[in-house]
Amino acid sequence: MTSMTTRVGQASAGRGEPQPSVPERARELLRTGLGLIGPRHARHSVSVDQLDALTLPIGDDGVVIGVDAEGRPAVLGLNRPTAYDVVLIGGLWTVQVIALRAAATGARVAVETGRPQAWMQMVHAMGGGQNGLAVYDVGRVPPQGTSAGTPVLVVRDCGMRPPRGRVVSGPWQSVLTLLPYLSPVAPRLVRQARLVGVQRISPDEATELGRTMALPRAEVEALPGLSDGLTLWCSDRDRQYVLTQPTDAEIGLLGTPRRMD
């Protein structure tokens, strides 16, 4: 406090005229609209050699559905301002993990299913449908009223031949359709989807799907031998194997990874 008083006094003497006190200067700044006098902090700086040490955890926004072949988090961006359709040819366990994690990010999840009993444990665990997850009969999903602040994931668990849904994908509303195996409607759904996930299927199914999706021979041969929890995710420009690893809480609720239900 002594040194600060000395500096202010020296500055006033140098100009030869009295200076306004700190409270008077603050009132003048407020009167002229210049705002409050905030705290003063020393500047933070680093040398050029230290810049390489600075890193920021910047990545895609979405749901972490597992890890890729290099052990990096694999993120599925479900909350989008444009329509987004996903098809998974696989097991209920993986879809339920995705739904659970989507709800944890703040999205509302609407499940359209012909087997509501398979979802009841999740509903009860999440507060009876009051915390982001609701289950509806096939064809009974009402309009969800989506927005950027309230995105929705519609999960269609409607068996081998899901009917055309009343609620379709749109801005801030993605649709994830589960197919236990290939069926006559699979090629149409696969062609319409922006992203397709494939878990373990039979060699004949792999051959048929390889023709539909133009998969390389190595991928077709690998599909019948995929382990539980492993999914080949395919988009127009990319293919990626993802291993879904459950947390302890997810194991307690859903069990361990499995292809068969």
Image: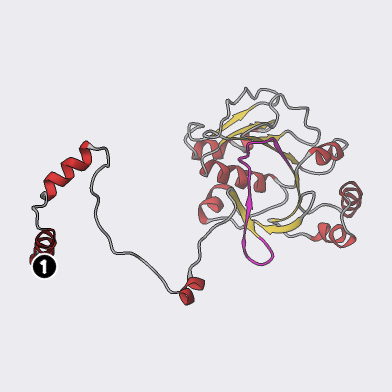
Tell which of 162 and 21 is nearer to you: 21
Q: Nearer the viewer, residue 198 or 235?
A: 235
Whether residue 154 is visible, yes or no, is no
Q: Assign the magenta stretch its main secondary structure.
A: loop
> Observer-nearest residue: 38 or 56?
38
Type of the residue with mark 1: Ser
Horizontal and vertical percent position of residue 164: 77, 27
**Color scheme of the displayed model:** secondary structure
User: Residue 61 in the image: x percent, y percent?
Assistant: 58, 49
Res 18 seen here:
yes
Q: Residue at x 49, y 32 (%)?
A: 128
Instruction: Give the residue at x 88% y 36%.
Output: 184
**x%, y% of residue 215?**
87, 54
User: Helix or strand or loop: what does disc 1 sit on?
Assistant: helix
Q: Is residue 120 left or right of residue 193?
A: left
* Vertical relation: 22 (above or below) 137: below
Question: Is 80 within the magenta?
Answer: yes
**Count of labels in the image:** 1
The residue wearing badge 1 is 3
Q: Nearer the viewer, residue 155 or 46?
A: 46
Q: Which residues are magenta?
A: 68-86
Expressed as whole percent of the image width and height from the top left, the position of residue 163 reads 78, 28
Residue at 84% across / 59% down in the picture?
Answer: 219
The outermost residue toward the bottom is 49
Quarter of the picture containing the C terminus is: top right
Question: Hey, which quadrant is residue 115 in on the image?
Answer: top right
Q: Is residue 260 left or right of residue 252?
A: right
Q: Is residue 203 located in the magenta-colored stretch of the structure? A: no
Count residues near mark 1 (Cα–Cα under 10 Å), then give few for <14, some for 14-19, many for 20+: few
